[in-house]
Structures are given as C-alpha cells and as structure tokens.
Image (spheres, rainbow, N blue to C red):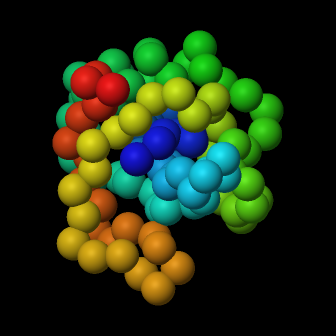
C-alpha cells in the first residue's frame, strides 16, 4: 500500500496513513498504528520527512489530521479484512517494500 502520511501524538509516533491506487487516483485505505518499534518508527519518520507536502495526496479529501507526504514509498501491510469502503481492518505494518 502507498504511504500517504504519518501521525504524531505530540512528538510520539502514532502510525501511517495508507492508500490504494485506482488508476491515477489514490484512495484512502486506513491508518496503520501497529507493527512499529522505536527503531522502525524512527527510520520510517526519517525517510518520510523529506517527502512532506502541504496537502493530502488522496483524490478525495479525508477528515484526518496528518503530516502528508508525496506518495512515493510502499508499505507491506498485513490485515484481517477490508470494510465495505475498502479500508483495512486490524492493520499491522510489516515493513517498507524495497523490491518495487
């Protein structure tokens, strides 16, 4: 899944926002806040900071406050199911996709 942004709770890491590609559109697929340890969260934040942008990269705006990034990095996400709207349920971060 494409990483669209990340969240901080104060200064503490609070997960990533992900999206799915539908043609040229990026559609919101949920927030992933499990699967990070201090090292992976710090590394991911370091890689995302240079990609920060002012606006959401989603085609349709969502009502979340995040730190939005250029949608260039892909994450491997494990999840149990998808909602009717296509959002992931019980998502877990497995790592960045470096193979693409």
Provide residue 5's location: percent of width, then percent of height: 56, 40
Q: Is residue 26 above or below residue 30?
A: above
Please state the total of marks drawn on the protein image: 0
Q: Which quadrant: the C terminus?
A: top left
Residue drawn at point x = 42 percent, y = 81 percent: 83
Among the 4 quarters of the image, the one containing residue 71? top right
Task: From the viewer's side, name the closer residue of 23 and 59.
Answer: 23
Left or right of residue 100, residue 92 in this image? left
User: Of all residues shown, which one is farthest toward the front?
Assistant: 23
Task: From the viewer's side, name the closer residue of 85 and 45.
Answer: 85
Among the 4 quarters of the image, the one containing residue 70? top right
Q: Is residue 15 above or below residue 30?
A: above
Residue drawn at point x = 73 percent, y = 28 percent: 53
Provide residue 54's location: percent of width, then percent of height: 79, 32
Inspect this view and state whether residue 100 appears. Answer: yes
Q: Is residue 66 above or below residue 51?
A: below
Provide residue 90's location: percent of width, then percent of height: 28, 68
Residue drawn at point x = 29 percent, y = 61 percent: 91
Residue drawn at point x = 26 percent, y = 24 percent: 99
Inspect this view and state whether residue 14 appears. Answer: no
Among the 4 quarters of the image, the one containing residue 56? top right
Provide residue 74's location: percent of width, then percent of height: 40, 35
């Amino acid at each position: 899944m494409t990483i669209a942004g990340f969240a901080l709770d104060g200064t503490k890491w609070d997960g990533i926002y992900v999206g799915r590609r539908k043609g040229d559109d990026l559609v919101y697929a949920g927030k992933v806040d499990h699967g990070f340890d201090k090292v992976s969260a710090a590394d991911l934040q370091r890689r995302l900071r240079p990609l920060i942008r002012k606006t959401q990269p989603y085609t349709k705006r969502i009502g979340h406050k995040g730190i939005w990034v250029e949608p260039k990095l892909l994450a491997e996400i494990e999840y149990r199911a998808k909602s009717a709207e296509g959002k992931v349920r019980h998502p877990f971060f497995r790592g960045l996709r470096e193979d693409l």
